[in-house]
Amino acid sequence: MTTIRSFMTEDHRRCDDLFAEAEQAVSKGNLELALVAFGHFRSAMLAHFASEEKTLFPTFEAQTGMRQGPTQVMRMEHEQLRGLMDDAINALKTADAEEYLGQADTLVIMMQQHNMKEENMLYPMCDQHLTAELPAVLERLETELCD
Amino acid sequence: MQAMLAFENAPPFAAPLRFFLTAPLFAVLAGLLVAYEGPDIFASRWTPGALAATHLITIGFMLQVMLGALIQILPVVAGANLKRPLAVARSVHVGLSVGVLLLAAGLLSGTPTVLGSAALVLTLTVLLFLVVTIMALIDVPTTSPTIRGIKFALFSLAGVVGLGVVLALGLAYGWPLPLMALADLHAGWGLGGWAGVLLAAMAYVVVPMFQLTPGYPARASWWFPLFMLLMLLLWSLAILADWPLLARLAQLGAALAGIAFAGLTLRLQGKRRRARPDATYRYWQLGLIASIFALFLLSTVAVWPAAADIDGWSLAFGVLLVAGGFLPFITGMLYKIVPFLSWMHLQSSGQAKVPAPAMNKILSEAEMHRQMLAHAAALALLLAAIFFPVWLARPAGLAFAVANGWLWWNLACAIRRYRGHLADIEAALAARLAAQ
């Protein structure tokens, strides 16, 4: 059965794959290709954040009444990740592989520990509290993320 | 509600940091002890010097970092919140540091009261840590192999310390105990059940995270902690009932499980998708290969016990597994954890108004790489010193002290830069506020 946890985790892995493509391009010294690949990764991440911030989190907040809890922390981390992605893309634009790798290292760990919190705590909480809304929420997430 | 609190309860930086900054100093002390004692320390694993040096590394370095890192990471990987993390960190840190110094002094001098006080201090310290973590973990369902691994590792921590206390008191007061068989079992619980299972539990998370490798296969990840625990329980039963064959079988099982885990990790790392191998990756490769050699020596002894009497066999096992395996794994992780935590704390102190410098501005790849080469050289010298102690014992001890002093220097520089950036960020925030 599809759950919020399995569906959103799947989307995290898709973003990881796109990030890895950019890394592969950097390791081959092809910074132009890396810029394109990183652009795809960034769009996928931004779409993921948007669907969480516009669909998943508000539903969770309305259902549980927890407005200042986990979703707030996740929004803050999204903001930090947006900043890190901007820095990384600027490094690629100025063709500074060294600077990019430094930024990417921070980005990878920030992104992975953020994903871990969502996958191990927030998504299971969503699945637990949103049983009635689950089909509708999943359908909306699917349309938002699969476009 | 348990899980929700975890999001905001990341402990202050000072909680894990004190452990990370003192741990390398105990490894320096171990190296200096080897250099001071010279060739005699390599006569057997039972020399007072060898026992003291071993515990300076396993408790002073390994246990310090492991407990410090758990205080930091339990909220993130398990949603478990320790009560008053900073106060717990302070007490555990002091207890471990004092306890390991007493233990090393007690083992070196053979003074019963010193050994007894070491046993008392270390027991109370670990007990405090266990009570606090078990209270935090008790309501956490075991939803991942990592959580299972942590829980089983904590059980083994109680086992290794319990056996250690029996051994210390037995040694101090001349109790009629099978000291050698119990010491082997004590090492099994410590290196296999505690350090090994905890390492696996962390590896499930950090190997894919740092290197972008595929994840560990689920079934094997769930089985590894359970299998290791079963082997150690069987081994303990074998000692109690005096069934040497069962003890050997359990040893073999634990060694083979370790080899399988290391082999699998090597294979996963082969599929990593990061752009460039970094110091953490290289440290792990070194650790995995050295561990496989060590566990191969161990499984040979299980099948053919006479091998243990070959000169240098047990020492080579210990050096390969601890200085070649666990120290590289732990140092490799410290090289990610310390810069990342620095960045994270700088980021939050900047309040999204002042950007934080990237991790490589806190600790650069070149600094970590050079220290790693020093550690690899020290490891090679230690291994060679087992066979040529007269020539190499002192240089090996010094090299080990230098490599770990260098690790301390790298971490201390990272923290100095962190403090510098923190001051800059606070000044920038104050300037913004004044301009408004």
Image (tube, rainbow, N blue to C red):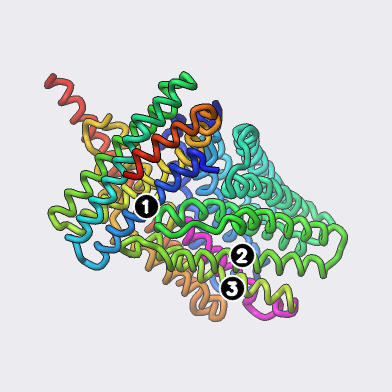
**B9 over B367 or under it: above or below:** above
**B330 over A87 or under it: above or below:** below
Q: Nearer the viewer, residue B282 or B51?
A: B282
Q: As shown in the figure, which amino acid type bears the numbered disc 1?
A: Asp
Residue B435: percent from left, percent from top: 12, 21
Which residue has dot 1 on it? A16
> Regarding mark 1 in the picture, which secondary structure is present there?
helix
Q: CA distance from mark 3 to mark 1?
A: 41 Å
Provide the major secondary structure of the magenta segment: helix
Say which residue appears at 78% left-offset and 53% top-offset: B170
Direction from residue B338 to residue B306 in the image, left or right = right
**A128 over B39 or under it: above or below:** above
**Residue B373 in view (yes/no):** yes
Chain that bears disc 1: A
Direction from residue B418 to residue B14 in the image, left or right = right
Q: Are marks 2 and 3 in contact (CB under 8 Å)?
A: no
Q: CA distance from mark 2 to mark 3?
A: 17 Å
Sequence order check, earlier mark of 2 and 3: 2
Quarter of the view holding residue A57: top left
Say which residue appears at 57% left-offset and 44% top-offset: B96
CA neighbours of label 1 inside 10 A, class few (<14), some (14 to 19), many (20+):
some
- Residue B58 inside the magenta-drawn segment: no
Say which residue appears at 27% left-offset and 58% top-offset: A22
Marks 2 and 1 share the same chain: no
Which residue has dot 2 on it? B258
Q: CA distance from mark 2 to mark 1?
A: 29 Å
> Regarding mark 2 in the picture, which secondary structure is present there?
helix
Which residue has dot 3 on it? B316
Chain that bears disc 3: B
Q: Which residues are magenta?
A: B305-330
Q: For the residues carrying marks 2 and 3, which lies nearer the camera in this image?
A: 2
